[in-house]
Image: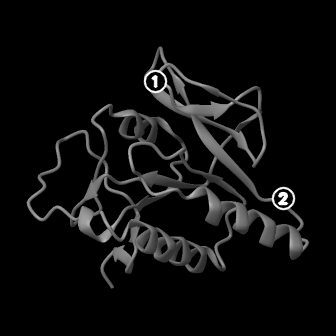
Amino acid sequence: MPDRLTRADLLQRVMRIWLVGRPDTVIGAYWPIKGEFDPLPALHRWKEDGELMEEPQRRRIGLPVIDKVHKTLTFHAWYPGCQMEEDAYGIPKPKDTELIVPTLLFVPCVGYSAGGYRLGYGGGFYDRTLAALEPRPFTVGLGFTNGFVADFEPEAHDLPLDAILNDNGVVWPVA
């Protein structure tokens, strides 16, 4: 994608604007791989904004850690500079930080479709995790405009996201 940096900058802005006024203080995200959009700069800024406003509850960011037995994800506190290690798939994860439970979860979209469905890399980690989490966090997919798949047919285990953001703005739910 030749204009990737421009699109990534636009999506960073969309994220930051979308987060304004949200009540969440614990957000789960992901470490970007294989060209996925990187949500961490916008989330770090969100965290800093909360500190500047002297909010009573500290804002926290969590990154996924794979539970190899159940093939689900748990989320552990992340902050810039925290010690990281690679998981079984070679993806960086926080090392020895506390388990946190997000009320808002940003998930990567390799592709996405109408109805709030996302395409990932086929491991099913997010679908299994979301099916098991109680209460389920508000889920937001992050992807680029060119990731829209018009003829995607979700499978029975696919769970729709609550919202999808791309470099043009909010694309699901359709207003």
152 over 171 or under it: above or below: above
Q: Position of residue 152 (x, y in %)?
A: 13, 55
The amino acid type of the residue labelled 2 equals Arg
Q: Position of residue 6 (x, y in %)?
A: 44, 74
Rendered image quadrant of residue 156: top left
Could you say which is closer to the camera, residue 67 or residue 2? Answer: 2
89 over 131 or under it: above or below: above
Which-is-in-front pick, marks 1 and 2? Answer: 1
Q: CA distance from mark 1 to mark 2?
A: 31 Å
Rendered image quadrant of residue 144: bottom left
Q: Quadrant of the N terminus?
A: bottom left
Query: Judging from the image, what secondary structure is the residue with disc 2 in?
Result: loop
Q: Position of residue 82 (x, y in %)?
A: 78, 39
Measuring 41% from the left and 72% from the top, which residue is drawn there?
Answer: 7
**Colour setup of the view:** one colour
Rendered image quadrant of residue 111: bottom left
Measuring 30% from the left and 79% from the top, which residue is drawn there?
Answer: 174
The amino acid type of the residue labelled 1 equals Tyr
Could you say which is closer to the camera, residue 50 or residue 168? Answer: 168
Could you say which is closer to the camera, residue 122 or residue 130? Answer: 122
Measuring 62% from the left and 66% from the top, which residue is drawn there?
Answer: 42
Residue furthest bottom in the image: 175
Residue 76 horizontal side relative to residue 171, left or right: right
Q: Position of residue 68 (x, y in %)?
A: 48, 17
Residue located beneath label 2 in the image? 58
Q: Which mark is residue 89?
A: 1
Q: Residues within 10 Å of mark 2 (few under 14, many from 20)?
A: few
Residue 55 horizontal side relative to residue 167, left or right: right
Q: Quadrant of the C terminus?
A: bottom left
